[in-house]
Image: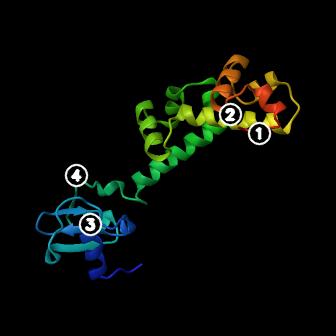
């Protein structure tokens, strides 16, 4: 997609997030290149050169900004890597990785640190890996309670809970009634 100089400069001037990752601004007076959303002072138009990629700006002799970190712009390898890591983690959680293991072992499987994984989940999912696993277990249990006649102990273990006691406590704290009462009420939540 070809973007005019005027449109690029306007996006930089107003820090338009819609253009983040679409182009990069090389500032000739500083030798630095930035993302359109960079919080630095807007450069004069005569000092701007626009590039379609961070690699093109680097090739032209500009160095990356330390404030906006253009290497982590949307659709960059770093950005895609974060998305891939979170997607892989969610897939592993859906497969039960946290039913038996912990966040540290999940992070190790993904090749990242556990603190970093927690930060990624906080930023991109809005919940911790354990909260995601707990929600998955609860939703699976709720579906099994309403859609099957299986005994509660079977549902607890099939949903990924480590004990019936943990299942009852977690279910009651979220839904306001124990699993048996929930089933008797026909899956209705008050």
Q: Which of disc 3 and disc 1 is earlier in sequence?
A: 3
Asked whether, in this view, residue 45 is left or right of residue 154, the answer is left
Tell me the CA gap for discs 2 and 4.
Answer: 43 Å
Identify which residue, 181 or 22, lies in the foreground.
Answer: 181
Asked whether, in this view, residue 30 is left or right of residue 108, the answer is left
Q: Which of marks 1 and 3 is in front?
A: 1
Identify which residue, 125 or 111, lies in the foreground.
Answer: 125
Relative to 96, say whether 71 is above or below.
below
Dots 1, 2 in contact, CB < 8 A? no
Tell me the CA gap for discs 3 and 4.
Answer: 15 Å
Mark 3 — residue?
57
Asked whether, in this view, residue 29 is left or right of residue 82, the answer is left
Residue 150 seen in render: yes
Q: What numbered label is drawn on residue 138? A: 2
Dots 2, 4 in contact, CB < 8 A? no
Q: Which of disc 2 and disc 1 is earlier in sequence?
A: 2
Mark 1 — residue?
188
């Amino acid at each position: 997609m070809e973007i005019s100089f005027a449109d690029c400069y306007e996006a930089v001037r107003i820090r338009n997030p819609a253009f983040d990752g679409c182009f990069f601004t090389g500032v000739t007076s500083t030798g630095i290149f930035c993302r359109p959303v960079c919080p630095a002072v807007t450069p004069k138009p005569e000092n701007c050169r626009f590039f379609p990629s961070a690699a093109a700006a680097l090739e032209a002799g500009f160095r990356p900004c330390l404030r906006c970190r253009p290497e982590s712009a949307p659709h960059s390898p770093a950005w895609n890597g974060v998305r891939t890591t979170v997607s892989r983690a969610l897939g592993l959680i859906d497969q039960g990785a946290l039913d038996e293991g912990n966040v540290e072992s999940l992070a190790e499987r993904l090749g990242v640190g556990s603190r970093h994984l927690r930060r990624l989940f906080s930023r991109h999912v809005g919940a911790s890996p354990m909260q995601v696993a707990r929600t998955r277990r609860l939703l699976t249990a709720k579906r099994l309670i309403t859609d099957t006649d299986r005994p509660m102990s079977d549902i607890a273990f099939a949903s990924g809970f480590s004990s019936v006691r943990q299942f009852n406590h977690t279910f009651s704290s979220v839904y306001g009634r124990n699993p048996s009462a929930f089933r008797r009420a026909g899956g209705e939540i008050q």
